[in-house]
Amino acid sequence: MISNTTCFAYDPIEQQHTLPGHPENRDRLRSVMRLLKTRGLLDQMDALPASPIPSTQLHWVHPPAYVKRVQALDESGGGYLDPDTYVVSGSYRAALTSAGALAGVVEAVATGQARNGMSLMRPPGHHALPDRGMGFCIFANVAIAARVAQRVYGLERILIVDWDVHHGNGTEAIFYDDPTVAFFSTHQYPYYPGTGAAEDIGRGPGEGTTMNVPLPPGVGDHGYLRIFDELLIPFAHRFQPDLILVSAGYDAHWQDPLASESLSLLGFALLAQRVRDLAEACCQGRLVIALEGGYNLTALSYGILNTLLALMGQEGDAEDPIGPPASANHDVEARIARIRRLHGLF
């Protein structure tokens, strides 16, 4: 019997990973949790405990030498894994718990305790490579969760949807030749980290299981929904996943300071609804969402609020105190046609 509830995982240990002046700091989730409490949303969901990821599961993606390097940097007082990615005292434990919280949501969904859920934790993870942190990311949370779903809970085929405005290069690299994990990414291009060309479709046995949708600035809600309807949905139905994982960044919002994709808050609600309905059609509703980017605190907070409402089937209650951008809706017709040809989606 599968539960119809939505669950979430949060632990204030994430507050220990912070650096004043850095875009990825503890104010992000302070703002989010304050809004969710004010709206009473946390009381409508099942709260899960968040525990550090066991080292065995962490090593399914990250070699011990890299993990030890992060730990040593933390214990020595902190430093940088790359010019964008800091470690302070407390970051190591926060990063372990961020990965572990997502694995806990996977457990709840895989075992039928919840129908779907979201991990409200940071630091994010989709840029992290097996042996290198980058782009604000320390451990590859979604990639680890995919391996946990497969190796612990027997869910063989995992679809990862990444709607962060930046390409999830780490996630892609980890599964690029793996036919059991499909990766779909919408991202501003060319933009950080410079990867994610449409022609990058996987390698060897994984050829065809990576779909990159590189976008110009200003695509907006209509363009994103067309991409989900005309590319993601047929791609997913062909792959037939047992679980959908989402790397949910909210930096494609039109007021985010780090990008310019022109999505609105109501647009994020519709993306979440599309993915929820896709999970219902493909994999008995099994859907797990992880937080990635998003650096305008109002857009981030309401973006997560709207995502959770969609998970609970209440997307009609979505809120948008910011409103739509002055202009958007870049023509995506030719881009969709090209990617359909590359993937043989006819």
Image (cartoon, rainbow, N blue to C red):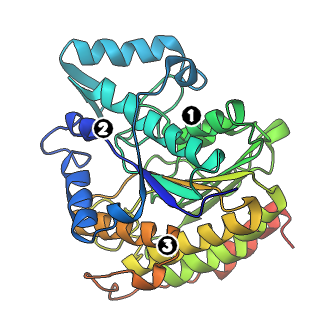
Choose the circle earlier in sequence order: 2 or 1.
2
Q: Which residue is mark 3?
A: 310
The outermost residue toward the bottom is 326
- Check disc 2 and give the amino acid type: Asp
Q: Please name whichever residue, 90 or 327, is drawn nearer the observer in this view of the structure.
A: 90
The image shows residue 274 at horizontal and vertical percentages of 60, 73
Q: Quadrant of the C terminus?
A: bottom right
The answer to whether marks 3 and 1 mark residues whose Cβ atoms lie closer than 8 Å is no
The Cα–Cα distance between marks 3 and 2, rounded to whole angstroms, is: 32 Å
What whole-number distance in Å separates the C-alpha atoms at marks 3 and 1? 25 Å
Horizontal side, residue 38 vs residue 310: left or right: left
Q: Is residue 296 left or right of residue 219?
A: left
Question: Residue at the spot x=46%, y=16% of the render?
Answer: 66
Task: Give the residue at mark 2.
Answer: 84
The amino acid sitting under disc 1 is Ile
Q: Give the foreground label among 3 and 1.
A: 3
Q: Pointer 1: what residue?
A: 144
**SS for dot 2:** loop
Closest to the observer, 92 or 133: 92
Residue at far front of view: 1
- What's the CA distance linking mark 2 and mark 1? 22 Å
Q: Amino acid at mark 3?
A: Ala
Quarter of the rendering containing residue 276: bottom right
The image shows residue 201, relative to residue 281, as above or below, that is: above
